[in-house]
Image (cartoon, rainbow, N blue to C red):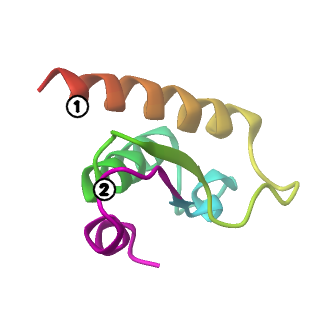
Amino acid sequence: ADVKNERENHGGGKALQGNFDPRFLVPGDHTGEDVVRREVRKMLEGIGCGSYIANLGEGLGGKESTELVKVFVDAVHEISEEMMKE
């Protein structure tokens, strides 16, 4: 679902959660710390950081890098804090 449209359709009084693509957390040529941070920023900028629960679209499947999962969690905290100051 398009989280931004959901927020517009249901108003600002409800928390939404959504969907970081977990494939960015699986080691390979298509990912890395910079890619995870970029995708987290896109996710947060797409909806805003107020009343939002950042999570994975499909959960963890066992192939994810623990280092990239940590980058995801840290990036959500850092980027959302940065956005709230703006």
Label 2 vs 1, first from the N-terminus: 2
- Span shown in magenta: 1-17
Residue kind at label 2, given as amino acid type: Ile
Q: Residue furthest right?
A: 62
Image-quadrant location for residue 29: bottom right
Q: Within 10 Å of the Cα at label 1, are there few (<14), some (14-19), or many (20+) other Cα atoms? A: some
Q: Position of residue 58 (x, y in %)?
A: 71, 66
5, above or below 66, in the image = below
Tell me: residue 43, above or below residue 53: below
Which numbered disc covers residue 72? none
Q: Circle 1 — which element? A: helix
Residue 86 versus residue 55 in the image, above or below = above
Question: Residue 18 location, x and y as percent?
Answer: 52, 59
In the rendered image, the residue lying farthest to the left is: 86
- Disc 1 marks a residue whose amino acid type is Met
Nearest to the observer: residue 15 or residue 63: 15
**Relative to 63, is 13 on the left or the right?**
left
Q: Residue at label 1?
A: 83
**Which of these two is toward me, 47 or 21?**
47
Q: Residue at x 68, y 32 (%)?
A: 67
Left or right: residue 57 compared with residue 34: right
Quarter that holds the C terminus = top left
The image shows residue 31 at horizontal and vertical percentages of 53, 55
Say which quarter of the image contains residue 34. top left
Residue at (57, 32) in percent of width and height: 73
Question: Marks 2/1: CA distance?
Answer: 11 Å
For label 2, the crowd category at 10 Å Cα-Cα, with few meaning under 14, some 14 to 19 and many 20 or more, is many
Instruction: Based on the picture, tell me whether residue 4 belongs to the magenta stretch.
Output: yes
Identify which residue is drawn at 32% across, 23% down. 81
Instruction: Say the numbered circle drawn on residue 47.
Output: 2
Q: Is residue 5 magenta?
A: yes
- At mark 2, the secondary structure is helix
